[in-house]
Every structure is written in structure tokens, then in C-alpha cells.
Amino acid sequence: MPQLSRYSDEHVEQVLNELVNVLEKHKAPTDLSLMVLGNMVTNLINTSVAPAQRQAIVRSFAQALQSSVSDDQAH
């Protein structure tokens, strides 16, 4: 079942495209891109989520990430 979001698909795509453009501008390889994005997620959680809620948010985020990754062999 698809999840409902308070954000439009267009807004999500716009932000995503801007992030991709920054990574491409810096010619960031996959490992650096993942490091930077991981650090960004950590910073957002540590600065924007109440301490009592952080572990629940991290579990939910990790589950969503795992669910969104395809197991197909093409890349």
C-alpha cells in the first residue's frame, strides 16, 4: 500500500533533483555520496527530533530504506 505524504510528488522531486545536482557537481562517487547523505540524515535527526523519539525515527527510516531498495541485479 503506498504511503500518503503531506508533500507533493513535484516538491519531493524538485528537492531530490537539487541534491543530485550538488552531488554531481562535486563528482561524488557512490561511497562519498552515501557518506554525505548518511551524515545529513544523522544531523537532521540529532538536531530536529526530540531525543526520546530518535530511535523510533531511525528504525522507521531504516525500514523504509530497506523496503525501497530493489534486489534486482541491474544497476
Image (spheres, rainbow, N blue to C red):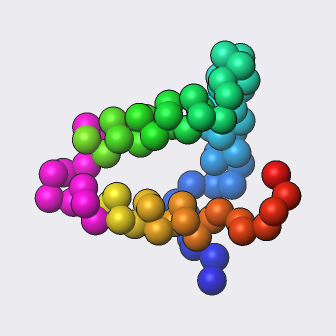
Magenta span of residues: 47-56
Q: Is residue 49 visible?
A: yes
Q: Nearer the viewer, residue 6 or 59?
A: 59
Magenta segment includes 52: yes
Indicate whether 8 appears above or below 48.
below
As drawn, the residue found furthest toward the top would be 26
Residue 6: x %, y % from top left: 52, 60
Chief SS of the magenta region: helix
Q: Which residue shows up at 72% across the image and 68% down it?
A: 71
Q: Which residue shows up at 63% across the image and 65% down it?
A: 68
Indicate whether 20 appears above or below 11.
above
Q: Nearer the viewer, residue 36 or 49?
A: 36
Q: Which residue shows up at 63% across the image and 76% down it?
A: 2
Q: Is residue 18 visible?
A: no
From the viewer's perspective, tell me whether residue 70 is left or right of residue 31. right
Residue 70: x %, y % from top left: 71, 66
As drawn, the residue found furthest toward the left would be 52
Exactly how many numbered labels are in the figure? Answer: 0
Residue 53 location, quadrant: bottom left
Residue 20: x %, y % from top left: 69, 32
